[in-house]
Amino acid sequence: MNNYDIIFAPVITEKSASMESEGKYVFKVDVRANKTQIKQAIEDAFNVRVIDIRTINVHPKDRRVGRYTGKTNRYKKAIVKLAEGNTISFD
């Protein structure tokens, strides 16, 4: 797996934006990736040093469109804390 098979996208919400001042960034990552793989991928892709990673498995939710029911996709979120002085820009 290369870095972009593990990291899918940053999660940009009001809550995740407020965490950036603490040096924490939120990413949507592959469900099969473990913390070691996520750390290596973030460090290689953004050239930063990662201190801590917390992961959350987001379970699918029931959704309905008219009479048809289904579920959303499952995914994993990773909250990544960077070392002092490191930042990631999403511009």
Image (cartoon, rainbow, N blue to C red):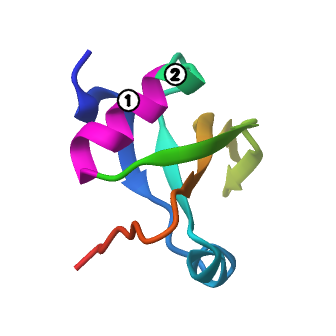
Q: Is residue 55 left or right of residue 26?
A: right
Q: Amino acid at mark 1?
A: Gln
Whether residue 72 can be seen here = no
Residue 45 is inside the magenta segment: yes
Q: Report the quarter where the C terminus lies.
A: bottom left
Q: Position of residue 65 (x, y in %)?
A: 64, 56
- Density class for disc 2 (Cα within 10 Å; few <14, some 14-19, many ≥20) is few
Q: Residue at x 50, y 72 (%)?
A: 12
Q: Residue at x 76, y 44 (%)?
A: 61
The main secondary structure of the magenta stretch is helix
The region drawn magenta spans 37-47
Q: Position of residue 69 (x, y in %)?
A: 71, 41
Q: Name the residue tied to disc 1.
A: 40
Contact? badges 1 and 2 (CB < 8 Å): yes
Residue 21 is inside the magenta segment: no
Q: Which mark is residue 76?
A: none
Q: Position of residue 27 (x, y in %)?
A: 49, 52
Q: Residue at x 51, y 21 (%)?
A: 36
Q: Amino acid at mark 2?
A: Thr
State how far apart marks 1 and 2 are (Cα).
6 Å
Up the image or down, 34 lies above or below 15; here it is above
